[in-house]
Image (cartoon, grey):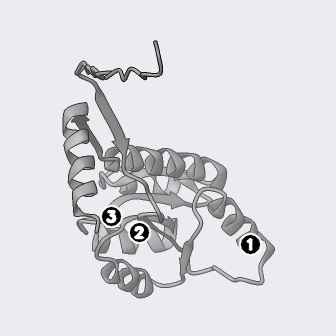
Amino acid sequence: MGGKESKQTVSKLTTSATVPSTVVRPSRRIAENYLVIWADESIDSKNTDCQNTLDELRSVVNDVNPCTTSTECIGCLNDNKEKISFVIASGALGQHLVPEIHNMPNLNAIYIFCGNKQYHREWVQKWTKIKELDSSIKSICQALSLAIKQCNQNNISVTIISAHEEDLRNSSRDEARP
């Protein structure tokens, strides 16, 4: 030990075990992917009942498109090429509107909001996309909320990849960086 320093070499042994695992990544929704139209000839923005109805609908969706004519509603639906559509129509307007819009591909469901359910019951039964006939906007909002929730669940895409694939992706990204 007389002044000589000994040098030691330490070898580092690294082991790694590969355990199969799964990474689940849900796609994120940035915006609502649906269009809600309220079609009623008597919509008046100054009317308290109309405001209350709009408030109820907006408790379910951010954006409600009010239309006072069949032509306006059909135009709104035709302009929509990508979003899933829902229409809430008055009984009187709906009776003429439904035959014109029923077969539109992006139209998911129609709700008839009317004061006389008995009067409209017969014609409503002929159309499969009519999901609700009610005089209560709360009931229609509940049905609409469930339909939107179902559409959201149907549209969620999930990618399942193994841990090995994830490692390959990460190393490819690291190599691509300057």
Along the line of sight, the residue nearer the viewer: 27 or 149: 27
Label 2, label 3: how many angstroms apart (C-alpha)?
16 Å
Amino acid on which disc 2 is placed: Gln
Against 164, is 17 above or below? Answer: above
Dividing the picture into quadrants, the one containing residue 34 is bottom left
x, y percent for residue 111 = 47, 57
Label 2, label 1: how many angstroms apart (C-alpha)?
24 Å
Along the line of sight, the residue nearer the viewer: 83 or 91: 83
Who's the residue at 26% across and 56% down the image? 173
Who's the residue at 28% across and 22% down the image? 11
Label 3, label 1: how many angstroms apart (C-alpha)?
25 Å
x, y percent for residue 140 = 57, 52
x, y percent for residue 120 = 47, 57
Residue 95's disc number: 2
x, y percent for residue 139 = 61, 47
Amino acid on which disc 3 is placed: Leu
Question: In the rendered image, which quarter contains the C terminus?
Answer: bottom left
Q: Pointer 1: what residue?
A: 51
- Badge 2 crowding class, 10 Å Cα cut-off, few under 14, some 14 to 19, many 20 or more, is some
Q: Pointer 3: what residue?
A: 107
- Chain-order first, disc 3 or disc 1: 1
